[in-house]
């Protein structure tokens, strides 16, 4: 008996099972592959590239949402910024925004007036020096840090060129005046010298702005209006900034 088993040829477990049970296991082993290779085109495609398809679909969905959002986003008629010592709290910001909505025109012709007003509070060296002596030391440090951050923000905004129209404290204007175009270039005529701070800036206190629109009075003291040269700003935004400059100068 032992000799008989020794004479049996070596066989795999699968072959042995087929011999004993009388079934062909090869078909079952290859069932899944056969189903895929012999299935339809989309089944094969999904089996081989399902993660590529999933990732690509996610990117496509994000792109579609972004495009739709961009198309539906309403454009501002005017974007303007204030640089100065006045801190514009929520109540003042709301008053200024409502007032500007009345002052600005529908420059882009979409039937709505939308204004984006931003501000940067900067005390300057004079403001730091005038901190009351009894103010706690850490508050002085915080003011210095806030001033440093504000200066960085102003530098970044001016150098980016995204906004053309500015209301600036006179001392801050001195830091950036080389960036602006002349009032004569904006208006097309020479303005009375009494209204001018220099050739590129008009004194807001010499206009009728704070009288006509009292809500703007807090940001009119010791400030000028000016229009930045075009950098990344579009021609349309620059034209709108010039139009607002002219509107303010010619208020009666």
Image (spheres, rainbow, N blue to C red):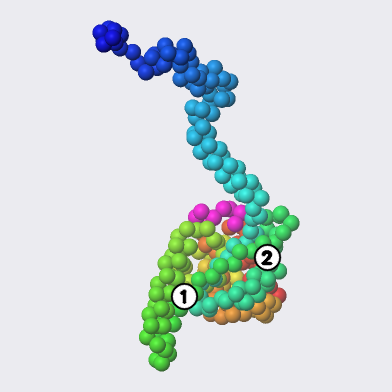
Near-viewer residue (183 or 52): 52
Task: Identify the secondary structure beneath mark 2.
Answer: loop
Query: What's the residue at 60%, 57% (across, down)?
Result: 237
- Which region of the structure is painted magenta? 230-237
Up the image or down, 149 lies above or below 185; here it is below
On the image, the x and y values in percent for residue 231 come to 50, 55
Near-viewer residue (10 or 208): 10
On the image, the x and y values in percent for residue 79 come to 59, 62
Residue 218 appears in which quarter of the rendering? bottom right
- In primary-sequence order, the first of circles 2 and 1 is 2
Which residue is label 1 attached to? 122
Residues at circles 2 and 1 in contact by the CB criterion of under 8 Å: no
Predominant secondary structure, magenta span: loop
Task: Identify the secondary structure beneath mark 1.
Answer: loop
Say which quadrant the N terminus sits in: top left
Near-viewer residue (159 or 52): 52
For the question of whether residue 63 can be seen, the reply is no
């Amino acid at each position: 008996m032992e000799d008989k088993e020794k004479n049996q040829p070596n066989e795999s477990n699968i072959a042995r099972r087929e011999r004993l049970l009388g079934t062909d296991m090869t078909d079952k082993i290859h069932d899944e592959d056969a189903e895929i290779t012999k299935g339809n085109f989309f089944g094969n495609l999904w089996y081989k590239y399902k993660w590529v398809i999933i990732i690509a679909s996610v990117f496509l969905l994000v792109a579609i949402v972004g495009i739709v959002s961009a198309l539906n986003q309403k454009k501002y008629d005017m974007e303007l910024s204030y640089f100065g010592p006045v801190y514009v709290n929520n109540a003042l910001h709301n008053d200024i925004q409502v007032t500007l909505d009345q002052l600005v025109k529908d420059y882009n012709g979409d039937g709505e007036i939308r204004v984006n007003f931003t501000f940067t509070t900067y005390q300057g060296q004079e403001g730091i020096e005038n901190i009351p002596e009894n103010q706690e030391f850490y508050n002085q440090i915080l003011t210095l840090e806030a001033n440093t951050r504000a200066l960085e923000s102003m530098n970044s905004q001016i150098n980016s060129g995204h906004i053309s129209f500015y209301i600036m404290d006179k001392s801050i204007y001195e830091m950036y005046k080389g960036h602006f175009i002349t009032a004569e270039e904006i208006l097309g005529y020479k303005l009375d010298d009494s209204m001018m701070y220099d050739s590129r800036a008009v004194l807001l206190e010499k206009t009728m702005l704070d009288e006509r629109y009292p809500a703007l009075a807090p940001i009119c003291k010791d400030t000028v209006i000016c229009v930045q040269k075009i950098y990344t700003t579009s021609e349309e935004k620059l034209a709108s900034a010039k139009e607002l400059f002219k509107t303010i100068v010619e208020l009666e």
